[in-house]
Image (cartoon, helix red, strand yellow):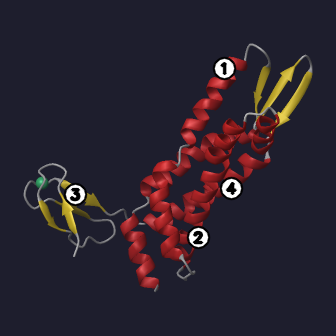
């Protein structure tokens, strides 16, 4: 038995079973307690596959190109981290690596590992552990902050050199709303239910 509290009137009640696509309302004031998205696994799996493709593009293709005095330099994300380390900016390099490369890779990888088997109806070892990680990890994924940093740096550098946005920057710009949508559509309760059904 699980207990839920109403956000509107603070009433505490036993959590009702709600089928996919349904919603639960407070027994006292009628406020919406929670909604179960229908097709959450299907929609999220499709979004995460799209995110994985965009993430690959974002890491393989040049992120930015600088044009200064007729010379053009391309940089990928990883080369950017490398260049920061060369300049002794180890803390900034670590931050860029964590927010732009490692954290989305973890998030996408773990989500694929859980949603893939749930979608296709088979089981992998450690799915429950992986999904618990996803839930704890979500508040720490801050790609949008990284993108704002890039934009601010780009505006400041615009006087010094011509900045040409690369393919990876567009991929990154698309990756952010797609990951946010996946996170929004992800109904943990349904995923847990489906994991349990496969057991
Ligand atoms: Zn209520």
Q: CA distance from mark 4 to mark 3?
A: 35 Å
The percent position of residue 19, horizontal first and vertical second, equals 29, 72
SS at circle 4: helix
Residue farthest left in this picture:
28
Is 199 situated above or below 47? below
Q: Does the Cβ of the disc 3 residue fall within 8 Å of ligand 1?
A: yes
Q: Is mark 1 within 8 Å of ligand 1?
A: no
Residue hosting label 2: 113
Q: Quadrant of residue 71?
A: top right
- Residue occupying the point 60% across, 37% down: 146
Which of the marked residues, 4 or 1, is nearer the chain's N terminus? 4
Could you classify mark 3 by the number of other residues whose Cα lies within 10 Å: few (under 14), some (14-19), or many (20 or more)? some
**Marks 4 and 1: which is nearer the front?**
1
Question: Residue under circle 1?
Answer: 155
User: How many residues crowd around disc 4 within 10 Å: few (fewer than 14), some, or many (20 or more)?
Assistant: few
Is disc 4 in contact with disc 3, using a CB cutoff of under 8 Å?
no
- Who's the residue at 23% across and 71% down the image? 2
How many angstroms separate mark 2 from mark 4 (CA)?
Answer: 15 Å
Q: Which mark is residue 33?
A: 3
Q: Earlier in the sequence, mark 4 or mark 3?
A: 3
Q: Nearer the viewer, mark 2 or mark 4?
A: 2
The answer for how far apart the CA atoms under marks 1 and 2 are is 38 Å
> Is residue 174 positioned above or below 70 on the image?
below
């Amino acid at each position: 038995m699980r207990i839920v509290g109403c956000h509107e009137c603070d009433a505490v009640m036993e959590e009702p079973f709600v089928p996919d696509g349904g919603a639960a309302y407070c027994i006292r004031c009628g406020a919406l307690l929670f909604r179960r998205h229908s097709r959450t696994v299907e929609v999220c799996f499709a979004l995460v596959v799209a995110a994985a493709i965009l993430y690959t593009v974002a890491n393989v293709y040049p992120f930015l190109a600088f044009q200064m005095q007729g010379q053009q330099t391309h940089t990928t994300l990883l080369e950017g981290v490398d260049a920061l380390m060369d300049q002794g900016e180890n803390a900034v390099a670590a931050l860029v690596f964590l927010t732009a490369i490692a954290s989305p890779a973890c998030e996408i990888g773990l989500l694929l590992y859980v949603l893939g088997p749930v979608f296709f109806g088979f089981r992998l070892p450690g799915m429950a552990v992986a999904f618990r990680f996803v839930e704890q990890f979500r508040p720490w994924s801050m790609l949008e902050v990284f993108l704002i940093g890039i934009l601010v740096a780009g505006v400041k550098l615009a006087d010094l050199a011509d900045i040409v946005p690369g393919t990876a920057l567009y991929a990154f710009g698309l990756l952010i709303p797609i990951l946010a949508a996946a996170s929004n559509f992800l109904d943990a309760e349904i995923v847990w239910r489906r994991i349990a059904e496969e057991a």
